[in-house]
Amino acid sequence: MADDLDDDQTEESLDPPDEEALDDDDDDDKDDDDSELERAQRALAKTNRENRRLKAEARERANKADEDGGKHKERADRLQAELDELYADAYATERFVEVVDAPPATKYVLGSNSCRMHVRWDERTGRILVIAVLDNLVKGAAGQAVQAFNVLFGLAEE
């Protein structure tokens, strides 16, 4: 049997370990398990703290955005009111031009010499959008010629 062993091994090393040595090994395993469990618990607690911090930051950003959105809405409303007033004043004396609050449709000017305009501040692009509708059969070349003739000879435009 000694021939089957490596040079480093002896028959004594093949003997089963005593009970006391086994108990010590079990204690070491328990310590390792406890320390792994503690490490996992610490990592989980750290992750939870980080998640709470990130959620708090997100809530803070959302609250700030709500406040900024309110200011932005006030500014947009103020600009819209200024535009409405500006266009209403500019076309107040024009008999055939009407500035309206909602986007117009051509059915409202069909068969007439009038033009309906709507002005809107586009917040997304920062541009002013003007929508105007007219009946181009009446307001075309023939309608324009009749209106010009009336103005030339001092007659009523309509």
Image (cartoon, rainbow, N blue to C red):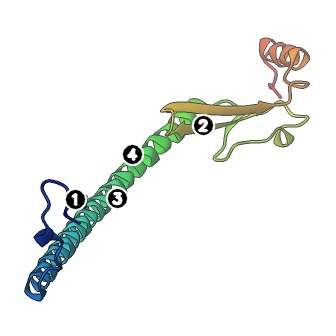
Of labels 1 and 2, the one closer to you: 1
- Determine which quarter of the picture holds residue 30: bottom left
Q: Position of residue 109 (x, y in %)?
A: 83, 38
Q: Is residue 151 left or right of residue 17?
A: right
Disc 1 marks which residue?
Answer: 3
Q: Position of residue 88 (x, y in %)?
A: 57, 37
Which is nearer the eye, 16 or 26?
16
Disc 3 marks which residue?
Answer: 62
Which is nearer the eye, 65 or 119?
65
Quarter of the image with the N terminus is bottom left
For disc 1, the neighbor class at 10 Å (few under 14, some 14 to 19, many from 20) is few
- Residue contact at pointers 1 and 3, CB within 8 angstroms: no
The residues tagged by marks 2 and 4 sit, at their Cα atoms, a distance apart of 16 Å
For disc 4, the neighbor class at 10 Å (few under 14, some 14 to 19, many from 20) is few
Of labels 2 and 3, the one closer to you: 3
Q: Position of residue 95 (x, y in %)?
A: 72, 32
Q: What residue lies at 9% left-to-right and 81% top-to-bottom? A: 21
The residues tagged by marks 2 and 3 sit, at their Cα atoms, a distance apart of 32 Å
Of labels 4 and 3, the one closer to you: 3
Q: What residue lies at 88% left-to-right and 17% top-to-bottom? A: 146
Label 1 vs 3, first from the N-terminus: 1
| Amino acid bearing label 2 | Val
Q: Tell me the number on the disc at residue 135.
A: none
| Amino acid bearing label 3 | Ala
Q: Is residue 140 left or right of residue 119?
A: right
Disc 4 marks which residue?
Answer: 75
- Residue contact at pointers 2 and 4, CB within 8 angstroms: no
